[in-house]
Image (spheres, rainbow, N blue to C red):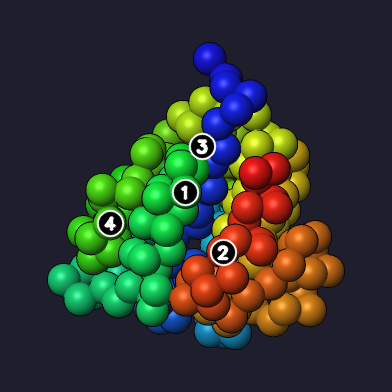
Amino acid sequence: MESRNASAVLFDVDGTLMDTNYLHTVAWWEAFRQMKHTVSMASIHRAIGMGADHLLEHLLGKDRDQDEDEAISTAHLVLYAQYSPRLPPLEGAADLLRGCAARGWKVVLASSAKSKELEAMRQSLGADDAITAVTSADDVKASKPAPDLVETALKRAAVPADRAVFIGDTVWDVYASRRAGVRCLGVLTGGISAAELLEAGAAAVYEGPADLLARIDDSLLESVGG
């Protein structure tokens, strides 16, 4: 049951809390290369933030051989897994989660990653004490930019859309949150410019988790209706 008095902060993880977007870029590039597809790293980077279900169509087109999709996605997962023991959290990420929780806001992770990838990132973050709930690509039919992940995160937080704010680093995060009726704040740590995030519909853009934490009481508090 939704509570009109509760508030929640929903977080993307890759590129928002973890410095992993370029690791994903390299892993996807090599996965495509193994299947004889030439896709530039620049194009791949700009698609990071989508779930694999959307990313493959975005980069290879609707007319691709879809029988290859599973092999490409599996190759990406295997290649990316080599980084799992040393995934780097962004500066201030864990402190930001704890800062939100300390203010009484529910903290929910809403990631397009598979649950196994998300678990590895949670271990690196080391802030489970601040996290209320999580949702991953395994929990929804369609990942970002579809609104499913954000809507599922809202349900798990048990708050309405107007009592939540989403934090993300890509235009796909902004699109997904807007489609779910949730205000979005952007961060620059995923490599997407402030102009692009604002044009997509982000309410404001910050340098990263540490910057957002430093201004938490004049940013998130207003956004979640506190």
Question: Which of the two discs, 3 and 2, sits closer to the camera?
Answer: 2
Along the viewing direction, whichever of 60 and 109 lies nearer the viewer: 109
- Residue at 59 percent across and 70 percent down: it is 215
Q: Secondary structure at mark 2?
A: helix
The kind of residue tagged 4 is Ala
Q: Which residue is mark 3?
A: 153
Q: Are marks 4 and 1 in contact (CB under 8 Å)?
A: no
Distance from the alpha carbon under mark 4 to that under mark 2: 18 Å
Q: Are marks 3 and 1 in contact (CB under 8 Å)?
A: no
Distance from the alpha carbon under mark 1 to that under mark 2: 10 Å
Q: Which residue is mark 2?
A: 216
Q: Secondary structure at mark 1?
A: loop
Q: Which residue is mark 4?
A: 127
Along the viewing direction, whichever of 66 and 148 lies nearer the viewer: 148
In this view, which residue lies farthest toward the left? 85
Q: Give whichever of discs 4 and 1 has the lower sequence position.
A: 1
Q: Secondary structure at mark 4?
A: loop
Q: Is residue 102 above or below residue 211?
A: above
Q: Secondary structure at mark 3?
A: helix
Q: Is residue 26 above or below residue 177?
A: below
Give the crowd class for mark 3: few <14, some 14-19, many >=20 residues within 10 Å.
many
Q: Give whichever of discs 3 and 2 has the lower sequence position.
A: 3
- Residue at 46 percent across and 29 percent down: it is 156
